[in-house]
Amino acid sequence: MKTKYHILLLFILTIGFSITVSAQNREYTRSTGPSLFQYSSSVSPLNEPARYEEIKLNHELINKFLRERKIVSFVLGKTNSGRNVEAWFFPGISSKKALVLGGMHGSELSSIEVTESLIKNLLQNEGTYYNVIVIPSLFPDNAVVAKSKPRHIGSTTNIGRYSLSTMREPNQQMPAPGQPFYEEWGKDYIGREIEAENKLLLSLINCYKPERIASVHAIRDVRRAGVFADPRTDSKGFALGYESDSMLAIEMAKFIENNNGYVPGNKLSSGPNALYYLDPIIVAKGEKQKRNMHGSPGSKTRRGGVSFGTWASTAVADAKDPSLNRDAMRIMTIEFPGAKRPQDYPAKAQQLQFKKLVDLYALAIEKIFLENFYLEEDPPIRILNLETTYAIPKDPEL
Ligand SMILES: [Zn+2]
């Protein structure tokens, strides 16, 4: 493990960073900055100070966000131990909606650094093409646990990955693919109660219905770091075509690599790959797509269930409540190399380099994922002049 980090550090130090944001030539002229509301209650009008009452996010509030086009920071709800799950809304220049998520695994502290870096940028810059809601840390209780054991961050002890109350894999407690999240039911595919934080996420999706999602994680084996896409299917599991999903992931990876970042899992030089290494091979459009229903190895109580990527990338049809029907969402799983925050590295040079890498992953979200690449239309549209096309990967590397 140590050697891997050394290789990574060597790689980074050798190449060095020079961030050139070439995808967009936009000038950032906003000088005064956007207006900002802090509130946590739908009963509190947006133009009044927050009253911090219990809120329930609903379609009306989301529509208000989209209509008023102001940056809003809000509280999605409470964790089991009463912490706020915070979120931000940033208006885009189009009507399209994106969601960015960090800290699904509380132990993956670097993922929270990436989403926080993104928020910092979005607060300063012009609106992106997509409207976006950012949840920087979905399981803040678990992140606090991870931070309390600094020597274990990134180690195989996985402290903070599972909520102690459940010891279940947070990323695999979703409803059946093709089924909506029924709030009053609140159970996952195999009938287990979904954790409070995931319920907040799923309720948000019920009323926000983003076209695309970026879920930021961190990966211990840094050679697998990169940007990956789940194959979208209809509600019955038949493939809708992977090309545009994989190309968006590859463009994000290219952006990182072209700016001297580190995305070895995408294998950009040897044959670009956007498939997560544990996921089944991609089938042709119209064929039945196999899904990974087991997840990563773990104890019996943790493993099994439907992953967030599988659920999100499967369309929902025939819901008892038709308002819960939705298209398959484009979902990118971003695996940052290593769970440590920059400050958790011992050497100053490493801290600096990892800070740059965090910022670069965040920039890829801002400049590629949130811009007008591969819009969710049929056929997908590429507006900017990107030169490469990529073969769809045939085999996951196992
Ligand atoms: Zn993770």
Image: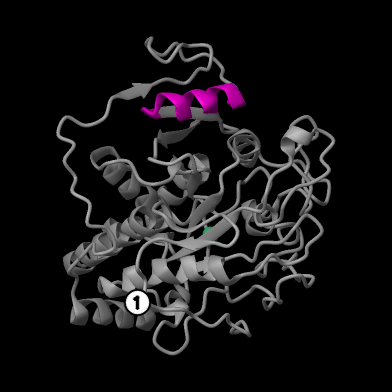
Which is the main secondary structure of the residues drawn in magenta?
helix
Q: Residue at x 42, y 60 (%)?
A: 153
- In the rendered image, residue 60 lying in the magenta stretch gets the answer yes
- Colouring method of the image: one colour
Q: Secondary structure at mark 1?
A: helix
- Relative depth, front residue between 116 and 288: 288
Q: Residue at x 49, y 48 (%)?
A: 101
Horizontal and vertical percent position of residue 74: 44, 27
Which image quadrant: the C terminus? bottom right
Name the quadrant containing residue 253. bottom left
* 52 left or right, relative to 191: left
* 256 left or right, relative to 27: right
Q: Residue at x 85, y 35 (%)?
A: 320
Residue 342 position (above or below residue 9): above
Q: Residue at x 54, y 51 (%)?
A: 212
Horizontal and vertical percent position of residue 344: 31, 59
Horizontal and vertical percent position of residue 195: 67, 41
Amino acid type assigned to the residue bearing label 1 in the image: Tyr
- Relative depth, front residue between 208 and 204: 208
Range shown magenta: 57-72
Numbered circles on residues, count: 1
- In the rendered image, residue 196 lying in the magenta stretch gets the answer no
Horizontal and vertical percent position of residue 217: 48, 59
- Relative depth, front residue between 174 and 349: 174
- Relative depth, front residue between 275 and 163: 275
Q: Is residue 227 visible?
A: no
Residue 42 position (above or below residue 308): above
Q: Which residue is mark 1?
A: 5
Q: Is residue 166 visible?
A: yes
